[in-house]
Each structure stands twice: as C-alpha cells, then as structure tokens.
Amino acid sequence: MTCDFQSLYYGEEGYVVRCRQCGHYQVAFISTMLTLNEADFFVFCKQVKYRALQSYSHVNQDSKIIMIATPSQEVQLILTPGELAMLYKALEEADSEKKAQELLCLFR
C-alpha cells in the first residue's frame, strides 16, 4: 500500500505529513526523518512541547544539549535551543493545520 500524504507543515527546516490511509506521521527535521504511528506522534509532540517551554537562557545557544527521545531506543534527537524552538513551531503549525482540515471535512 502506498501512503497518501496530507501536508500539515512545510518549511525550510523540514516538514510534517500524515498518511490519509494508515494514519502514520512523517516528521522530517534538519537531517532526520521519523515515521511515527499516531500514538507515538502525540507522545513525541508532548515531549517537544515540554522541553520547548523550559528556559535555556543560561546555556550556550549553539550547544546541542537538548535530547528528544523517539519511539526507537536507538534514535534520539540532539538539538540546540534554537533548533528545539523551530521543531516546536513546526509541530504546533502542523497541529493547527490538522485541526483546520478536520473542521473543513465536517462541512463536506
């Protein structure tokens, strides 16, 4: 089966898409691409949000000091505070787009 991707976010640093058939999400960010089922995607988003809402003003902003776990034990993202902010923004925009598209479907 081939995925039919619905674009939720597209930017210079990456993209977020969701398959209309299987519901899997694909998150591409900088040099990493993750394919996540819906439950794992929401856990990932929750973790990114938690980390993004912390203060990193006391650390070197160019240091890769923030670890974001993925469903795979072998893969973690290591980000700078700026990269984390960009990822958080991308995921928030993807969530807003998904909600908007769901509302539009109600009127079809």
Image (cartoon, helix red, strand yellow):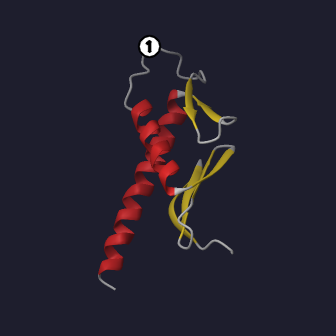
Quadrant where the C terminus is found in the figure? bottom left
- Identified at 59% across, 51% down, the residue is 14
Amino acid carrying label 1: it is His
- Identified at 61% across, 24% down, the residue is 64
Disc 1, SS: loop
66 vs 69, nearest the viewer: 69
Looking at the image, can residue 36 be seen?
yes
Q: Can you tell which quarter of the image residue 89 is in?
A: top left
Residue furthest bottom as drawn: 108
Can you give x and y, in whole percent of width and height, for residue 82 in the image? 51, 32
Mark 1 Cα shell of 10 Å, populated few (<14), some (14-19), many (≥20): few
Can you give x and y, in whole percent of width and height, for residue 44 in the image? 50, 43
Can you give x and y, in whole percent of width and height, for residue 77 in the image? 61, 34
Q: Which residue is mark 1?
A: 58
**From what the image shows, is residue 101 above or below residue 17?**
below
- Identified at 40% across, 33% down, the residue is 50
Is 58 displayed left or right of 61 in the figure?
left
Quadrant where the N terminus is found in the figure? bottom right
**From what the image shows, is residue 33 above or below residue 81?**
below
